Amino acid sequence: MTVPVLASQMGAFIAIHAQAAEIYRRLGAEDMEVFRLADGEPKYGCRGISNLVQAQGDEVIVVVRDRFADRERYLRLAPVLDGDPGLALLFDELVKIVDFSRAVRAEFEQALP
């Protein structure tokens, strides 16, 4: 997921994801990682991610990557993660600080070993 987050809410955003990452790992995911955008401008003939997800005011662009051993593990764990009450509570906190209508999500699988 790529999403703008108010700079003043980054501490809460990271704390929520740190707790969620613990639950993810406990339930069998490899990890959950949070990255703050360092450079999203167009380069080398490519569009920049800042063309797709735009920060306004004092927002920063953040990418959250959930990592699983493989697609099969993800497919097995997704319903478990979606039904976890602890993750549901964390998501309720997250929607208070993130506008998900501005988020962009995707699922990727490893192409090269």
Image (spheres, grey):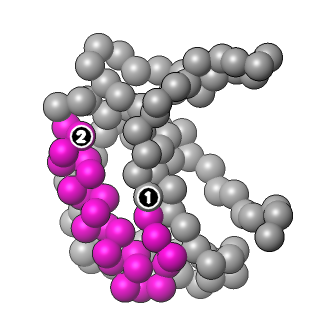
Residue at 26% x, 19% y is: 58
Up/down of 26 relative to 97, above or below: below
Between 50 and 96, the residue placed more toward the observer is 50
How many numbered marks are there?
A: 2
Residue at 41% x, 79% y is: 25
Please tell me how crowded label 2 is: few (under 14), some (14-19), or many (20+) other residues with Cα within 10 Å. Answer: some
Q: Residue furthest right?
A: 112
Instruction: Identify the magenta region.
Output: 9-32
Q: Is residue 31 left or right of residue 106?
A: left
Residue at 82% x, 64% y is: 112
Marks 2/1: CA distance?
14 Å
Q: Main secondary structure of the magenta part?
A: helix
- Residue annotated with mark 1: 33
Say if the magenta span includes residue 88.
no
Q: Is residue 96 visible?
A: no
* Three-letter code, disc 1: Glu
Between 42 and 92, the residue placed more toward the observer is 42
- Residue annotated with mark 2: 10
Between 113 and 95, the residue placed more toward the observer is 113
